[in-house]
Amino acid sequence: MPSGGVITWSDVSRPSIPPVSRYSGLPGGVAAAVARLERAVGRRPGSAKRAAPSAGACYPCEIVLAPVDHTALALVDLQQRRLLVRSAERECWNGDAFVYFLVGRPWLSMRRYGRRGYLYHLLDAGHAMLNLAVAAADPPRDFRVPREVLRRAEEYAAQRAASVLAVGLLDRGGPGEAGARWMLQETTRLPVPLSDVEMMITSVLPPTPRPVWLRLDDDPDVAALAAALRQRHSASVLDAMPDTGGLGDALAQTEKLCRRLVPALDLPVPEVRVFSRHPGLGATLPATTWVTQAILGQSDLVNASTFVVFQAEVPDKANGVLSPEAQRTVMACGMAGEIGYLVAARSGLGMTGIGGFDPVMWARQCGTAEDVLFLLAFGQERSGEKADATGAGGNHGR
């Protein structure tokens, strides 16, 4: 643990070495569950990028897993493909039904984006929730998470300066690609203690929103979104498309699914506004000089064909702290944005989410007093590297 005060030699000379008992392969049941979670929000085969987008690639969420009939917890380490469990609880992981908790860790975004990073962590959570709901959430069949299991997950989150944002159930599915390159790591300490720098964030965190229960009925639209997960990606550079090329259908499908799927998860539905260079696809997009200012000089995106704006009436804005319902509104916009990502992937369109923009300019363009919370840009994808317009200055882009 940190010594506190000014940095000393012992602080910098002693690495944090977690207590490890042993490594082994994953038991079959939990391996199948982990494979579904990885498909929804984890790394792609042969890539460091993940299935769910994240502002600045911060990935400010983690997943905690529990057997449905036990209070044991495991951390699903999506980066290193490890399932961390307590050694004394190893035998609890041989079942085939599990509850998982999406845990938001705002520190991972706020260390890069300051307090604005809290909004990005909520948007990212919304992206992850949609992916989990379509690919890794089984109908509950009247199942209720045992209060003691939820309490343990909430305690775990509190120790991580985090909060439980969503809950899902995995109770079926064959092993398939289960456990590929994954290991079970037994340890005597879970979770790993926060650093002293991470602990500083706890004093500024707002109240926790109630968790979203992840469940969508099986239907062709949901299955089609799940199938698009492997193709989803964020374009770095967008140019105007020579013609609409299916863009109109994709925009209509995005709005239709937002209005149907977001309320099915008990979240408020954001309003969707479209601004396009193509006549007949929403309102006319202003001149490039306006767009450049409105997206904070991100020159690689200013020539995109179409921008989709998600706006909402954020509740409790006059409160002294960010309210739970305001947080749920932001997560709903992240979920709606992820629907757009998956529809674009299925349609073969270039698209990216934009977190760095001038909300006042876009609200004026929309003619609304509501808050603009997220943008999507559609167009013809070109090669290049996406600029980060909202990161702290002087950090070489990271």
Image (spheres, rainbow, N blue to C red):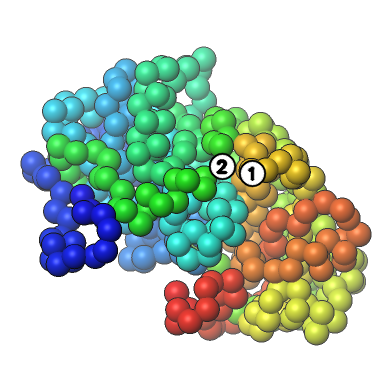
Q: Write the residue at 69% across / 58% down.
A: 374
Which residue occupies the extreme left position in the image? 21
- Which residue bears the numbered disc 1? 322
Q: Which quarter shows the C terminus?
A: bottom left
Q: Write the residue at 24% across / 38% down.
A: 190
Q: Which element type, helix, strand or loop, lies under badge 1?
A: loop
The x and y percentages for residue 341 are 61, 58
Q: Is residue 343 visible?
A: no
When asked about the image quadrant of residue 43, the answer is: bottom left
Residue 256 or residue 50, whichever sits in front: 50
Q: Are discs 2 and 1 less than 8 Å apart at CB?
A: yes
Q: Residues within 10 Å of mark 2 (few under 14, many from 20)?
A: some
Q: Which element type, helix, strand or loop, lies under badge 2?
A: loop
Residue 8 or residue 25, whichever sits in front: 8
Q: Write the residue at 36% across / 43% down.
A: 160
Q: Is the residue 147 above or below the residue 135 in the image? A: above
Q: Is residue 203 visible?
A: yes
The x and y percentages for residue 320 are 67, 43
- Which residue bears the numbered disc 2? 206
Residue 153 or residue 114, whichever sits in front: 114
Q: Residues within 10 Å of mark 1 (few under 14, many from 20)?
A: some
Task: Name the residue type under label 1.
Answer: Leu
Badge count = 2
Residue 31 or residue 293, whichever sits in front: 293
When asked about the image quadrant of residue 94, the answer is: top left
Q: Mark 2 or mark 1, which has the lower sequence index?
A: 2
Relative to 384, 252 lies left or right: right
Q: Write the residue at 48% across / 81% down.
A: 394
